Image (cartoon, grey):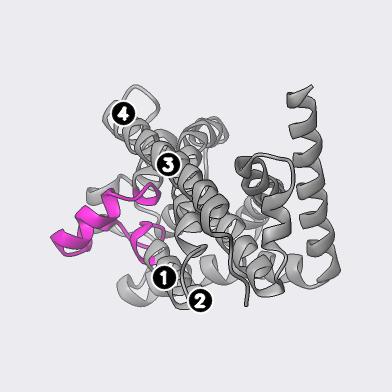
Amino acid sequence: MAVTEELRALYGVAAKSWRIFLSYKLWMVSDIMLGFFFVGQALLIGIGLTGQRNSPALQRMTGYSDYLTFAVLGFMVLGFGLTFMSGFVWSVVDELYAGTLEYSFAAPMRRITFFLGNVLVRIFLSFVYMAVYIPLFVIVFDVHINSAGFFKGISVLLLGIVGMIGLGMTAAGIVLYLRDPGPFINILEMLVFALSGAMYPIKILPEPLQLLAKAMPYAPTSEAVRKVVAFGYSNSINEIGYLLFISAIYALLGYLAYKWSEKQARIVGLKSY
């Protein structure tokens, strides 16, 4: 019975998030345009820096000579990363600003149900966007991705998603008790973008930033997905193993953050703005 009630609550939270999404008619258009701007920008940067799409230097570092294919796979990971960050964090902040978060937390459901319900719609939309992006990228930008390798990359992406969810929950737990969470979220999203390895290999970053990038789940996911797509599972054992490790760490952190936020909510309540 308890499981049935939690599933019903999960559906209710997800349905609410879906209705909010549908109430803003241009969100889907802007999200799809973001993908084309990202890939178009990557193409222009690649051509501007090297005079062509193919780069021998990039191939030596990553195994990819076509910068655009490299960027498309990175954008796929980044899109999911920002989905989980915004899905957990901004949904909490929006309810804080609206003054309704206490009512949501007072509802007879687990906090994890509340968090996951808010992000389910974004997960669904991310897969929808991917189904739109990939064929169009192939047609418009002449991107070449082996279909078998691509689906192998999706399986590795699912491993990285565990860590991304954990980091999103950790950030959401912190946001609950910040006086003004906006600047914190903006800085965190910029870090995600800069250290995801989506636009460039993290090997070109200064060593301290490389270490920070590897300590977050996004760059390890990007590297593992690209390696699997290009070379298969057997040649990507190290990248997959490290991704499993970092995802497990953030899954634990996310769970602890969830337990902490639930305890704090019961002790001191939640603020609104």
- In the picture, the quarter occupied by the N terminus is top right
Q: Residue at x 52, y 53 (%)?
A: 267
**Disc 1 designates what residue?**
190
Which disc, if any, is residue 182?
A: 2
Which disc, if any, is residue 241?
A: 4
Q: What residue type is labelled 3?
A: Leu
Which disc, if any, is residue 1?
A: none
Query: Magenta span has 197?
Result: yes
**Image location (x, y in percent) of residue 20:** 80, 63
Asked which quadrant contains residue 231, the reply is top left
How far apart marks 1 and 3 lie (CA) works out to 24 Å
**Image location (x, y in percent) of residue 226:** 40, 42
Q: Residue at x 66, y 41 (%)?
A: 113
How far apart marks 4 and 2 lie (CA) works out to 35 Å
Q: Which residue is drawn at 30% across and 56% down?
A: 201
| 4 vs 2, front mark | 2
**Disc 3 designates what residue?**
256
How far apart marks 4 and 3 lie (CA) works out to 23 Å
Asked which quadrant contains residue 108, the reply is top right
Compare marks 4 and 3 and give the one earlier in the sequence: 4
Q: How many marks?
A: 4
Magenta region:
194-219
Q: What residue type is labelled 2?
A: Gly
